[in-house]
Image (cartoon, rainbow, N blue to C red):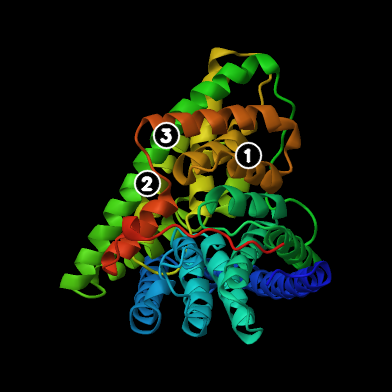
Amino acid sequence: MEETEQQQRLGQTRYMGLAAIIGILVGFAGAVFHLLIDWLIEWPNWLATVIEGPWLVVIAALLTMVITIASVYLVHHYAPEAGGSGVQEIEGALEGLRQLHWRRVLPVKFFAGLFSISSGLVLGREGPTIHIGGSIAAAISEFSRCIDFERRGLLAAGAAGGLAAAFNAPLAAVLFVIEETHRQFPYTFRTYMGVIIASCLAAAVVESFAGVEPDLNIPLQVTPLWVLPAFFILGCLLGLIGVLLNAALLAMADFGAACHARAPYAYAAIVGLLTGALFVLVPWSVSGGEKVIEALANQPPAFSLLLGLGILRFITTVTSYSTGVPGGIFAPILTLATCLGLAFGQIVDGFLPGTDIAVSAFAVAAMGGLFTASVRAPIVGVALALELTGSYALLLPVMVTCVTANIIAHWAGGRPIYEQLLDRTLARAGIDPRAAASREPIGLG
């Protein structure tokens, strides 16, 4: 029996109310997660006040090693699906291929993610925050006894709220659901509005804690239109690098899993040990990198240092993720892109001396471009780069870079990283993703 117009509106109102509750809860959880990481990640400075010399490096290395091993232990023994980013788990749940066990995922993702990201490993908070948001939505859906269609819509709303909370980027969060989960998301009026409501409220809660400024403070100026061909070239390079990065992430994840199967925790211990030492010796080469981005953009070092730092961060990114601890790849991608974009900008500036080109503009464009090449979501890449930096005057250069990077990545045979990660997860669980039947949205308003 079809719903009457009044019943449909009551259903929509109830659903949007649930989305609002989810947005507020996810915003609060995301804000606490963010603030705790920002506080805990200063531990090398605290350690330096009581320990000096070589012992500082040794203690830091051992501390990160212990945290990495503990995080791996929590994941393997209590919530295997909490490892890594978690975005692929949300996509699998939306498609009906994965079950979101929120009771075990929430505590493990929050606490193991908190300590692994704060330890100095090259991981971002956005993946865990998205997974936490989806888990909160799963809990609300269960308690409110939603039907499957509404549950899937609320999962997407929670995930969007998580991304909005992680980066204070509500527009990018909404677009992420539209562009990244277009195959799984059940589109109707109520589910779409629910995603927007959850994203806005999550961002509002975060802003009430952290302020309304963009997440990254980068000096910018308007870039002349005649420089656009340089952004096209940058997009071509980033398209290829993004495909290489995805391949490295998957290969190292398989290598890390194989090492763990043969000698449990040995690989995680080695990665943690080296990362902790680097956190003291070369701090810009590790951690998620938000502060690194600001430092590099405000005072760009020499080209050779930027290139070396980019190569080093490429290595630390793929090795950190391959340990299997909770942590995302958004922030590491953005930091790697900053190194590459600034280096490329210095090359352009060297070929065109005296033209006063803003080198930092290439850093912003590179953030969107490398994200696009990896995730294959160009509109999200544009919105994320602009919202994170507040550089809306760079809309056209960022769009050129993102679209070009997406085309080159496609032509190079690259696939979206989260699609590949989900396929890997399903294969390890003995599920053939190609055998999953497509699910059409139920016709509710």
Callout in the foreground (2, 3)? 3
> Which image quarter holds the N terminus?
bottom right
Q: Alpha-carbon distance for marks 3 and 1?
A: 16 Å
Residue 92 percent across, percent down from the top left: 44, 64
Q: Alpha-carbon distance for marks 2 and 3?
A: 11 Å
Residue 319 visible in the snapshot: no
Q: Are marks 2 and 3 in contact (CB under 8 Å)?
A: no
Residue 219 visible in the snapshot: yes
Q: Is residue 150 above or below residue 233?
A: below
Q: Alpha-carbon distance for marks 1 and 2?
A: 20 Å
Under mark 3, the amino acid is Ala
**Splitting the image into 4 quarters, where does residue 355 fall?**
top right
Q: Are marks 3 and 1 in contact (CB under 8 Å)?
A: no
Looking at the image, is mark 2 or mark 3 earlier in the sequence?
A: 2
Under mark 2, the amino acid is Asn
- Is disc 2 surrounded by few (<14), some (14 to 19) or many (20+) residues within 10 Å? many
Looking at the image, is mark 1 or mark 2 earlier in the sequence?
A: 2
In the rendered image, which residue does mark 3 sit on? 409
Secondary structure of residue under mark 3: helix
Residue 100 percent across, percent down from the top left: 48, 75
Secondary structure of residue under mark 2: helix
In the rendered image, which residue does mark 1 sit on? 382
Looking at the image, is mark 3 or mark 1 earlier in the sequence?
A: 1
Secondary structure of residue under mark 1: helix
Under mark 1, the amino acid is Val
> Which image quarter holds the C terminus?
bottom right
In the rendered image, which residue does mark 2 sit on? 246
Q: Residue at x 30, y 59 (%)?
A: 253
Q: Nearer the viewer, residue 281 or 366?
A: 366
